[in-house]
């Protein structure tokens, strides 16, 4: 099949004669289109190698028809076909050169068509390990032949599944990047799957696999690996199990229909729904069941009509339950996203490094809206949070109604925006069930907002505003009519990515971060000095005979004169003390 290289090489080539075009269309009828010498016509794969010979035969046929004919127009037609034949040969050479250079260009980060991103030491943890998205990371060496062979297949898969998962590349020829992987691969390339709460899975490419797949370059095997290892939600096999899940608190999203392993839908069709479930699992509970189990739990009013196969049953935080019938599982993802867009503002989750982008980022759930503002509630109790959510919902309804009235009247109105409330604790928690401490940027940004109990942040533009009113009943109107002035944070100020807490951080990292501060350095110095001053050096009994000094006072000696004894913990709880030296004027006890 001719490609973009053929088209670029044939720009400016004169158009073929109409009779020749008609012959091509009759001889090469197919549904597959190709571009050849500036003329689009169907081309069968079996004519790919014969197209040049076909041009030669057409040129000879035209020559035989005009032998001895002095008509300059016909002779010009012959020259045109011969010229196009030469251009066709040049296009074929260009195509072969392009195919040879394709693997090298696929590994270049500067190439525009790359779907996967290059990962480094500074962003691997924040983008991959602290993400709610599913990541497939390729460990490669740019100088390895197998990696070059796999590059095209890898990018094809990344373009095909780019809406369902994220794809990244890690150059393991650099030792510091190889240390980021769960194990050090011997053969390359290796693809690792990272998903929150799941162990890392891996897949290895081989040249034999690429030869078996012909032009796929290992892409088909990678697709099978992705589909078989993509996170799924639980499927309830019986009605009693489904009833227990449905009776629990919180929003529920039930996918009703055949299982993902059935022939009713392909595994790829389920991936958008599986992705939504994995990303939003912290706030919404997903499950699947068949139609019979659903009817036994929810009643006959939810039964399927004749010819229906799929349905989506949604229950919001208020308890209202709705059922949406769809033709196939692919149509469920937009409905789920609309439901989440309506429900998530009614929650005020604790914002963390892992979830702040999906809640408040520039790519958050802003369906049909222009902007997303993050309302940060600082140290809000359960009662204060419930009150804020109620007032926020009231303000949203009033503002959206005003916008709709302006549109109905034919007046210009701005696109409605959304406000997502989140909670943040201003100090470190003393108990593991309480929110974790905020990120290192919180103190500076909170100080800019005058340490208000609630403040607005727009992540995309780095703007903020302190909310000083005691009520949120008109927060939407205050932002829309600019009564609440948003100010710019300094460009070189604290990064917003470190504003929120990281409850998954390790103790070692927390200690290292504390020791890097001035207070931590002082505490470390005092602790080391204390240990050095009292710890023995080279004592034969080691830790079990730790020497320490205890002040003792004699009854006949003034209390400001201390007597020191050297005590050794010889075994168990037995403490033996012997005089170390006699001080002048002091009697040993």
Image: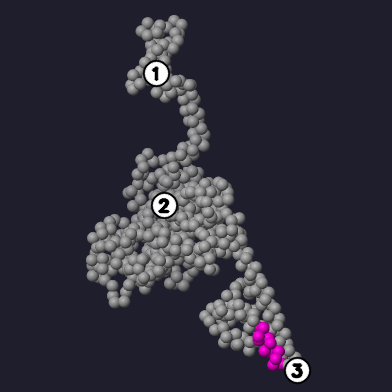
Residue 103 visible in the displayed image: yes
Answer left or right for 20 relative to 165. Answer: right
CA separation in Å, label 2 and label 3:
80 Å
Query: To which quarter of the image does residue 437 belong?
Result: top left
Judge whether 293 appears above or below 173 on screen.
Answer: below
Q: Which residue is mark 2?
A: 199
- At label 3, counting other C-alpha atoms closer than 10 Å, the crowd grade (few under 14, some 14-19, many 20 or more) is few
Q: Position of residue 521 (x, y in %)?
A: 51, 32
CA separation in Å, label 3 and label 1:
123 Å
Q: In the depicted view, which residue is nearer to us: 284 or 579?
A: 579
Judge whether 181 appears above or below 222 on screen.
Answer: above
Check residue 568 in the rendering and tell me which mark sits there, or answer none: 1
Classify the position of the N terminus by image quarter. Answer: bottom right
Q: N-terminal of the two: label 1 or label 2?
A: 2
Q: N-terminal of the two: label 2 or label 3?
A: 3
Q: Position of residue 319 (x, y in %)?
A: 29, 61
Q: Which residue is mark 3?
A: 68
Q: Tell me, yes or no, whether the highlighted magenta stretch contains residue 332.
A: no
Q: Secondary structure at mark 3?
A: loop
Which one is in front in this view, the residue at disc 2 or the one at disc 3? Answer: 3
Q: Secondary structure at mark 1?
A: strand
Instruction: Report the magenta residues as a range.
Output: 55-66
Which one is in front in this view, the residue at disc 3 or the one at disc 1? Answer: 3
CA separation in Å, label 1 and label 2:
49 Å
The dominant secondary structure in magenta is: helix
Q: Position of residue 520 (x, y in %)?
A: 49, 34
Answer left or right for 548 relative to 10. Answer: left
> Measuring 35% from the left and 46% from the top, which residue is drawn there?
381
- At label 1, counting other C-alpha atoms closer than 10 Å, the crowd grade (few under 14, some 14-19, many 20 or more) is some
Q: In the depicted view, which residue is nearer to us: 502 or 349?
A: 502
């Amino acid at each position: 099949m001719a490609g973009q290289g053929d088209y670029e090489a044939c720009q400016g080539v004169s158009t073929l004669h109409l009779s020749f075009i008609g012959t091509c269309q009759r001889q090469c009828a197919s549904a597959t289109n190709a571009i050849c010498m500036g003329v689009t016509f169907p081309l069968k794969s079996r004519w790919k190698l014969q197209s040049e010979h076909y041009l030669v035969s057409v040129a000879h046929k035209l020559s035989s028809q005009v032998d001895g004919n002095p008509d300059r127009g016909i002779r010009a037609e012959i020259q045109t076909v011969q010229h196009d034949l030469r251009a066709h040969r040049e296009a074929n050479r260009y195509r072969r050169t392009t195919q040879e250079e394709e693997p090298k260009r696929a590994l270049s980060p500067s190439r525009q068509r790359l779907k996967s991103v290059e990962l480094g030491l500074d962003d691997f943890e924040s983008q991959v390990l602290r993400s709610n998205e599913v990541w497939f990371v390729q460990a490669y060496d740019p100088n390895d032949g197998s990696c070059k062979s796999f590059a095209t297949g890898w990018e094809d898969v990344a373009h095909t599944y780019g809406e369902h998962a994220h794809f990244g590349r890690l150059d393991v020829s650099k030792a510091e990047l190889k240390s980021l992987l769960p194990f050090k691969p011997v053969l390359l390339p290796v693809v690792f799957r990272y998903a929150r709460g799941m162990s890392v899975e891996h897949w290895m490419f081989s040249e034999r696999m690429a030869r078996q797949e012909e032009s796929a370059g290992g892409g088909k095997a990678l697709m099978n690996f992705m589909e078989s290892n993509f996170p799924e939600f639980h499927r309830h096999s019986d009605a009693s199990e489904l009833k227990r899940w449905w009776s629990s608190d919180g929003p529920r999203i039930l996918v009703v229909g055949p299982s993902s392993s059935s022939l009713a839908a392909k595994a790829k069709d389920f991936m958008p729904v599986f992705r939504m479930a994995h990303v939003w699992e912290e706030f919404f509970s997903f499950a699947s069941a068949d139609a019979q189990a659903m009817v036994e739990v929810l009643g006959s009013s939810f039964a399927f009509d004749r010819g229906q196969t799929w349905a989506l049953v949604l229950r919001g935080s208020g308890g209202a339950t709705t059922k949406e019938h769809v033709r196939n599982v692919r149509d469920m993802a937009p409905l789920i996203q609309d439901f989440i867009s309506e429900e998530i503002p009614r929650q005020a989750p604790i914002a963390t490094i892992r979830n702040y982008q999906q809640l408040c980022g520039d790519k958050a759930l802003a369906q049909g809206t222009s902007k997303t503002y993050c309302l940060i509630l600082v140290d809000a109790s359960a009662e204060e949070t419930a009150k804020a959510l109620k007032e926020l919902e009231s303000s949203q309804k009033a503002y959206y109604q005003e916008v709709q009235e302006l549109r109905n009247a034919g007046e210009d109105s701005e696109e409605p925006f959304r406000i997502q409330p989140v909670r943040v604790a201003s100090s470190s928690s003393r108990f593991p069930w309480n929110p974790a401490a905020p990120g290192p940027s919180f103190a500076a940004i909170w100080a800019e907002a005058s340490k208000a109990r609630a403040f607005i942040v727009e992540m995309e533009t780095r703007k903020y505003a302190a909310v000083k009113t005691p009520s949120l009943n008109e927060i939407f109107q205050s932002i829309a009519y600019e009564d609440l002035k948003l100010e710019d944070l300094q460009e070189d100020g604290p990064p917003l990515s470190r504003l929120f807490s990281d409850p998954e951080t390790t103790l070692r990292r927390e200690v290292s971060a504390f020791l890097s501060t001035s207070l931590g350095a002082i505490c470390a110095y005092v602790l080391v000095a204390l240990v050095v001053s009292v710890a023995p050096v080279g004592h034969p009994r080691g830790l079990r005979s730790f020497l320490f000094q205890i002040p003792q006072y004699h009854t006949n000696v003034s209390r400001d004169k201390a007597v020191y004894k050297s005590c050794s913990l010889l075994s168990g709880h037995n403490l033996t003390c012997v005089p170390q030296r006699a001080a002048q004027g002091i009697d040993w006890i």
